[in-house]
Image: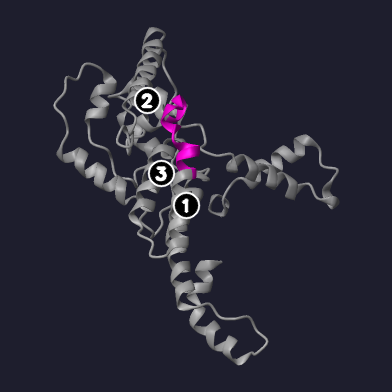
Amino acid sequence: MIERFLKIVDWISPMLLRDCSGPSMLSAYDIEALQQLVRLLKPLEHVTKESSGEKYVTISKIIPMINCLVAQLNKIKPSTDSISDVQVTLLREINKRFGSIELVTSIAISTLLDPRFKNLHFHDANACSKAMSTLRKMMNNDLVDTTTTDTLRECDAPTTETYNFWNHHESLALGQKTNRPDGIINDELSLYLTNPVVPLITNPLEKWEELKNIFSLLYKQARINFAMVATSVPCERLFSKAGATITKTRNRLTGKRLEKLLFLGCFNEEDWF
């Protein structure tokens, strides 16, 4: 709403001047404050939309997005006290809610298994080490009872936007490519982490299909961990569709028939035509 107002502010001002009973127009100081507020909220909007997807991997993006979000907010230099207070509050609340996100094992392992991020965005060395240790144990358990796994194909890719939220990640990735350590590679995970990260536009599911013959144990763990979603929004969408399907005029639908209708409704139009 604020962004829309700023786009048409040049047309709103003359209209308010003609109407004596209308509300007062904002001052230049207020408009500048709104412009800075939009810049502060833009990264939050991107994170909200990106983490709410259901047709691409989201669980592995949580730690990188929080890291980039904090970097984006710190980069903004407000010129007004009110917007500066908003910035401080946002950073404090982000740290309060996500300051220990790296300690969540499932999220940390998923981030390590994403070829786009790996261990680039970990600030807590102990959390990263714990996730790697847990992942190695899971790999060793798979190695004991190795069985032939069926390959599934998933080609869903995230949508791209013009707003470049990932500047901080790109600088980290560039630093990794030019300053890779020459450590001892003694297992599959170490070899995987030593290789440079892939571009952000890469679909991690498709990339793991290419890497499965090289990192077979990691491939299996990636397939398991990437099935999780970052937020509850995809599940809420399903219930919203169910609520829209069962209306007052269609309240006699059986559970079996409703399940079929919801299944058919989950496809895009291009899948049908």
Residue at image mark 3: 65
Give coordinates of residue 257: x percent, y percent.
Answer: 76, 39
Q: Residue at left 34%, top 50%?
A: 166
Which residues fall within the magenta stretch?
Answer: 93-107
User: Which quadrant, please, contains the N terminus?
Assistant: bottom right
User: Which kind of residue does numbered mark 1 sit on?
Assistant: Leu
- Figure disc tally: 3
User: Which kind of residue does numbered mark 2 sit on?
Assistant: Ala
Q: Which sits in the foreground, 177 or 26?
A: 26
Dividing the picture into quadrants, the one containing residue 132 is top left
Q: Any mark on residue 127, and which?
A: 2
| C-alpha gap between disc 1 and disc 3 | 10 Å
Examine the rendering and report whether any part of residue 58 can be seen: no
| C-alpha gap between disc 2 and disc 3 | 17 Å
Residue at image mark 1: 44
Dividing the picture into quadrants, the one containing residue 105 is top left
Check residue 101 for magenta coloring.
yes
Q: Residue at left 50%, top 31%?
A: 227
Q: Which sits in the foreground, 159 or 180?
A: 180
| C-alpha gap between disc 1 and disc 2 | 25 Å
